[in-house]
Amino acid sequence: MHFSFETIPTFVWVFIATYAIYWIKKPRLGKNEPPLIPYKIPIIGHTLDYLFNAENFLAECRQKYGDPFSVYIFGQVTTIAGNEIAHEVYAASDTFSMTNATRDSFPLYRILKSIEKPDTLKITVKAIRDGITAKLPAYTERVQRTLMFSINKEIGDCSKPKVITTVNNFSSMVARSVADVLVGQEISKDEDVVKAFADFTKDFTAVLAIPPILSFIHPKVHTKIITLPLKFGWNPILKHLNTLKKHLKPVLEKRLKDREILGDKYEPPLDVIEYFLNNLEKDTKVITDDYLNKICDFIFILVIASIHTTSHHTTFALYDFAGRPELWDDLYEEQVIIDKECNGELTPHHINKMVKLDSFLRESLRTFGSVAANPHRCFESYTFKNGMTVPKGRIIQTYLSDIHYNTTAYGPNPRSFLPFHGLENNFPASKTDRDYFVFGAGKHACPGRFFAVNEIKIGLHKLILNYHIRTPSGKTEKKLNYGPVALPPVAGLIFENRKK
């Protein structure tokens, strides 16, 4: 290979730039911080192990260094909190923020401007608690009706075995019932709205498809680069916002007019947009563009929080059911008994009687496979009860595998599937505790978990009643992993009509 004198300055500048980045980004730990795992590659640190071998890598670190410990990934020190420490992070909600931690990696504020406002989280949580959870029994009939419509549409007759591609179909199923609750029965019947809800998170995630390589310089550099296309007109999400605005505006205007004409005789529809009409600038007389934008922002925040995770967990649960023939009879017989009792029309009482299905779902949620998730940023220096201190600005990742597979809570073989562990220990699927972090923990645990669990149980109940469901391999399918995050298998599921 020939090197000219002209190439020497190039190598020198590359060397200087690399050394400067290394020196600037070299971890500097304070007193009593969690131990930083040694690494061999400067700048890169533990990033490759975290991306391609997260489960084994973090397990080895936990065994050798205890809980918590720190790793160096994507140009910054991140602390990993397991089953001994994570509950302290969630309990100290004034010191640690998950919303702030995801701001750079998931810059939704570039699309939904309301996220930037300080009261957004409070309003969103209150809307879920008052507009959905408090009225959960009233939604039961509508959820099962919309789910059955979706099942007939997306799966339909399977007199001959049919392979169903799961992710897109179940996103649409969940989206239809969520749309009914969020924006009402008039709008949720429109297929364009259902598609907008089903595709919003997927299309926004496409914007984030570039690996966070530039985070080695600084997380904000990565954020600016991946969102550049939005500034130049490429915005696959904007069409979903416009779809909702188009259908929502006339409905809101009609409701305001009906209120004015009917007065006390006005019968408010049961949905979240009615809740927003009563609580967001409730004295408004005109649906302005700003007011419409604000409501649509909140609706899509709820879409992000509900449809993506619920459809994924529904899919995980179906794979767990389809790949375990030893559970089929037990779960099917329970659904048959309940179906006969309610004559096909489920009530909250009957959903509560699905104790075996609930326990099975809880186990599916526990073992869904993500190794680490739910990052929190530390707003100020914090000392854990074990004496270790994390500095202001530090990201704390929840080590889910260490929590969900600990031997104290789940016995000597915690990675085995324990379908009736919840039933035997009186742990319902929606109940959070220090050994079960699917829905977070503490006062900031997911407020929509009761609706989500009910929706999944209704869907599973109807599917198990109507179809034999199995995997193509006849075994449990291997889940996919993107770094420490689990994704559903892609093999599809085989559905076949049950003989009545």
Image: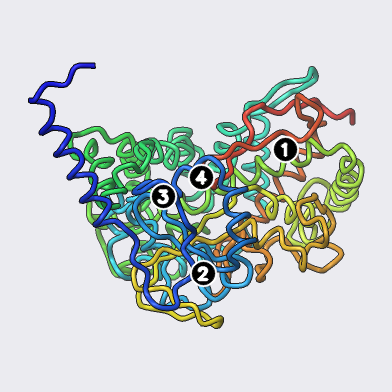
Q: Residues within 10 Å of mark 4 (few under 14, many from 20)?
A: some
Q: Using residue 214 as the reference point, say whether residue 447 is left or right of it.
A: right
Measuring 72% from the left and 62% from the top, which residue is drawn there?
Answer: 406
Colour theme = rainbow
Sequence-wise, which precedes: disc 2 or disc 4?
A: 4
Measuring 82% from the left and 62% from the top, which residue is drawn there?
Answer: 411
Sequence-wise, which precedes: disc 1 or disc 2?
A: 2
Determine if residue 356 is in view: yes
Mark 4 vs 3: CB contact within 8 A: no
Q: Which mark is nearer the camera, 3 or 1?
A: 3
Residue 44 picture location, percent across and down: 38, 46
The quarter holding residue 202 reads top left
Sequence-wise, which precedes: disc 4 or disc 1?
A: 4
Q: Where 298 sits versus 216, above or below?
A: below
Disc 2 on helix, strand or loop? helix
Disc 2 residue type (three-letter): Asp
- Of the 4 image quadrants, the one containing the N terminus is top left
**Residue identified by numbered label 3:** 45
- In the depicted view, which residue is nearer to us: 12 or 243? 12
Sequence-wise, which precedes: disc 3 or disc 1?
A: 3
Give the Cα distance between marks 1 and 2: 33 Å
Give the Cα distance between marks 4 and 3: 9 Å
Give the Cα distance between marks 3 and 1: 36 Å
Q: Which mark is residue 49?
A: 4
**Residue identified by numbered label 1:** 319
Residue 137 picture location, percent across and down: 66, 62
Give the Cα distance between marks 4 and 1: 28 Å
Q: Where 250 sits versus 33, above or below?
A: above
Disc 3 on helix, strand or loop? loop
Sequence-wise, which precedes: disc 3 or disc 2?
A: 3
**Residue identified by numbered label 2:** 130
